[in-house]
Image: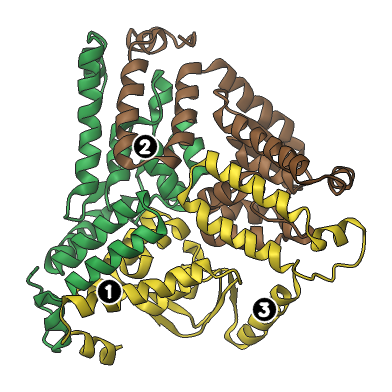
Chain colours: A yellow, B brown, C green
């Protein structure tokens, strides 16, 4: 991280903006990616790593895991890469304020209490937990997962009324898929993603 | 549920949309209804039942209660009937992602930890808990309840600035009501809803 | 409080609106103030006090602390001064509905479980906890704190896409500050706020 920041300090406004916009594009791509994203956290996720973890769909965290949104500690804005948008929507505005303003590290159990952890496991069980979830998602109904994730992302920015309209269209479409038809016909769920 | 889905599978696009929009209208009506809505949950609330429970104002849940947003398990979108809008606003985006993407059931205590439960009681005490709350709400200040619920619904979709403006108008109006005047005059609170 | 309400009851529509808009301006000013705001809560925070506590950035609560959003108990709207906007974003829509519709008091531990408490301490340690945090914030990177708070406030009302754009611009600007440069040069962090 010090190396990255070392390069940044020499840049002028235009190049700084290019850099910060590029980091934001990572978060946008993660949220708009139709495939669910799992992050595995062992040891500390600091700064940008914390925000990338925040933008994932599943955070599987080992007991050694820690998070620190340390931006203010280096004189920067805690609202980096969408953190001031995402974190309040994950842990509430009060917890997000403490985490982003103060930048102090929290351990895995505290993160879990905040609502930042999808699954808390022993470090020794981390790889297996990630593999189990990844395998399940890979074998599951691709279209249904992609649509659910897309709605979770989009409906943070929509009114209830518009969200209901979008849901109705999306669900009607999914009702015409082979995946749903197979389920209805009582066939074993060999999801084909179409 | 299998019977409903059995009928749906024969439908074409236009009819499917009519059906999914109709289910969305149920949720909109619940959120826009000026009367607070209580749901009692004993045993499992699955699929649409879970979303209807989510759209209520109070979820009184017995210890046998369970929730499952099972849509992806049948190849459909987890964002059905406003679930991808409502659930993140109730339990946060991380918990909502796990519940809607995976569709696994959670028991009453887990639902309570997620923030999905208004009141958790023994199954034997469910009817009394519901009756107590319903009686209290029915005997209370109707206009104040209706206005509070309306603002909770609408201000999910408004900026802080607009919300403050709406609050100011609503509160000024309520300050002119007989209900509030009775309180100010120190008369016993026999709410008249006007 | 009874004295305030006693005066209000004599007012006509125009003056009532002036009063309710003025109370809303307090909340807006708190949220838009570039300096982080700490509230210390000992004993009961009732009605408007509760909402003012809610609009602060840090709520340091003694074990004797209680909150009651009692508006409906006096026939008024629970959505006073932005409460129906802020409280769901702090504790989720389900908890906020119970607190604002029913108006019942909650104790410090319950408020903590709801996510309403930034720091829970013994009453005897309240003054020290507040002084410690205030001193830390006063000695810290002013611009970074101000920008973080501003983004937390604004991005509740923005789309992810717009939030990422705003973050990129804000962070690029902060990367040009003396505060950040001092950190990069490895100098001790004597924050100068510019």
Query: Is A38 on the left-hand or right-hand side of B70?
Result: left
- From the image, tell me which residue sits under label 3: A134
Q: Earlier in the sequence, mark 3 or mark 1?
A: 1
C-alpha distance separating marks 3 and 1? 31 Å
The x and y percentages for residue B109 are 66, 54
* Badge 3: residue crowd in 10 Å (few <14, some 14–19, many ≥20): some
Q: Secondary structure at mark 2?
A: helix
The crowding category of the residue bearing disc 1, from other C-alpha atoms within 10 Å (few below 14, some 14 to 19, many at least 20), is many
Residue A18 at x, y = what percent?
27, 77
- View extreme (right): residue: A186
Chain letter of disc 3? Answer: A
Same subunit: marks 2 and 1:
no
**Which of the two marks, 3 or 2, is nearer to us in this view?**
3
Same chain under badges 3 and 1? The reply is: yes
Give the position of the N terminus of chain A as an image quadrant. Answer: bottom left
Graded by Cα atoms within 10 Å as few (under 14), some (14 to 19) or many (20 or more), the crowding at tag 2 reads: many
At horizontal 60% and vertical 42% (from top left) the residue drawn is A165
Report, in whole angstroms, how far the alpha carbon at label 3 lies from the one at label 2: 41 Å
Image quarter of the C terminus of chain A = bottom right
Q: Residue at x 25, y 39 (%)?
A: C27
Q: Nearer the viewer, residue B114 or C12?
A: C12
Q: Nearer the viewer, residue A29 or B102?
A: A29
Report how far apart the C-alphas of labels 2 and 1 lie in the structure: 30 Å
Residue for point 31% across, 56% down: C152
**Residue where numbered disc 2 is placed:** C83
Query: Which residue in the structure is indicated by mark 1?
Result: A71
Q: Secondary structure at mark 3?
A: helix
Mark 3–mark 1 contact, CB under 8 Å?
no
In front: B88, or C30?
B88
Q: Chain of mark 2?
A: C
């Amino acid at each position: 991280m010090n190396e990255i920041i070392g390069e940044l300090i020499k840049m002028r406004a235009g190049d700084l903006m290019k850099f910060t916009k590029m980091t934001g594009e990572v978060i946008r791509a993660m949220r708009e990616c139709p495939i669910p994203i799992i992050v595995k956290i062992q040891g500390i996720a600091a700064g940008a790593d914390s925000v990338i973890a925040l933008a994932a769909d599943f955070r599987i965290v080992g007991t050694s895991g820690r998070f620190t949104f340390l931006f203010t500690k280096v004189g920067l804005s805690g609202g980096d890469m969408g953190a001031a948008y995402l974190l309040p929507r994950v842990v509430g505005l009060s917890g997000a304020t403490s985490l982003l303003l103060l930048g102090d590290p929290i351990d895995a159990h505290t993160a879990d209490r905040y609502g930042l952890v999808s699954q808390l496991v022993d470090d020794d069980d981390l790889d297996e937990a990630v593999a189990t979830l990844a395998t399940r998602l890979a074998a599951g109904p691709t279209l249904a997962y992609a649509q659910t994730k897309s709605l979770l992302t989009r409906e943070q920015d929509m009114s209830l009324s518009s969200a209901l309209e979008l849901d109705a269209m999306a669900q009607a479409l999914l009702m015409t898929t082979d995946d749903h038809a197979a389920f209805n016909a009582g066939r074993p769920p060999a999801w084909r993603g179409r």
